[in-house]
Image (spheres, grey):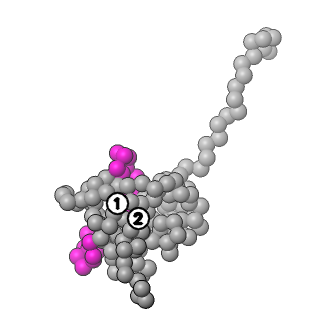
Amino acid sequence: MAVAGTECWTAEPHVPTAPSVELLVLGAHLSGQPLNHELLTLGGALVGTVRTAATYRLWALATVPPKPGLLRVASGGAAVVGELWALPAAAFGLFVAALPAPMTIGSVALADGRRRPGFLVEPAATADALDITAHGGWRQYLAGRVQPGR
């Protein structure tokens, strides 16, 4: 039994939210792009726009739908714009398990020094792909393409 005036006030126990994983997306999964619905369906939430460290090259791959491939390089790299999405950890596992080749998920260095899981590409897929690194990101590349009828 507590003595009057000596009771300790304690906050309600903290109930952690479901564990989540931040995923870097760079192309078809960006907000408004053709595969973004996959992240939304899995309960994903946009964290924000980020840049990679300046150690990557970006290629336009011959996939359907069109998507870019990011590859870390020893030299001649640049920063690339992408988005971080938070996915429930279980959903992240489902997402990665369904990922088609040549896409992979690996540790990507961000410009601010953090590392996050993110989209990468198998090196062989870049052999015949267009290097679009100079555009700085997928949206910038798409905006610069000449559209039929223009």
The residue nearer to you, when weighing 105 against 134, is: 134
Q: Are marks 1 and 2 in contact (CB under 8 Å)?
A: yes
Residue at left 41%, top 64%? 26
User: Element under label 1?
Assistant: loop
Residue at left 41%, top 73%? 143
In terms of image quadrants, where is residue 105?
bottom left
Residue furthest to the bottom in view is: 149
Q: CA distance from mark 1 to mark 2?
A: 8 Å
Residue 36, x across and y down, in percent: 52, 69
Horizontal side of residue 29 vs 62, given as left or right: right
Residue 80: which disc? 1
Residue at left 61%, top 43%? 16
Circle 1 Cα neighbour tier, 10 Å, few/some/many (<14 / 14–19 / ≥20): many
Q: Tag 2 or tag 1, which sits nearer the N-term? A: 2
Single out the mark in the foreground, 1 or 2. 1
In magenta segment, residue 106: yes
Circle 2 Cα neighbour tier, 10 Å, few/some/many (<14 / 14–19 / ≥20): many
Residue 56: which disc? none
Query: Quarter of the image containing the C terminus?
Result: bottom left
In magenta segment, residue 40: no
Q: Which residues are magenta?
A: 105-131
Q: Disc 2 designates what residue?
A: 26
The residue nearer to you, when weighing 39 against 129, is: 129
Could you tell me the amino acid type at mark 2?
Leu
User: Element under label 2?
Assistant: loop
Residue 32, x across and y down, in percent: 52, 70
The residue nearer to you, when weighing 147 against 83, is: 147
Residue 40, x across and y down, in percent: 58, 65
Residue furthest to the left in view is: 75
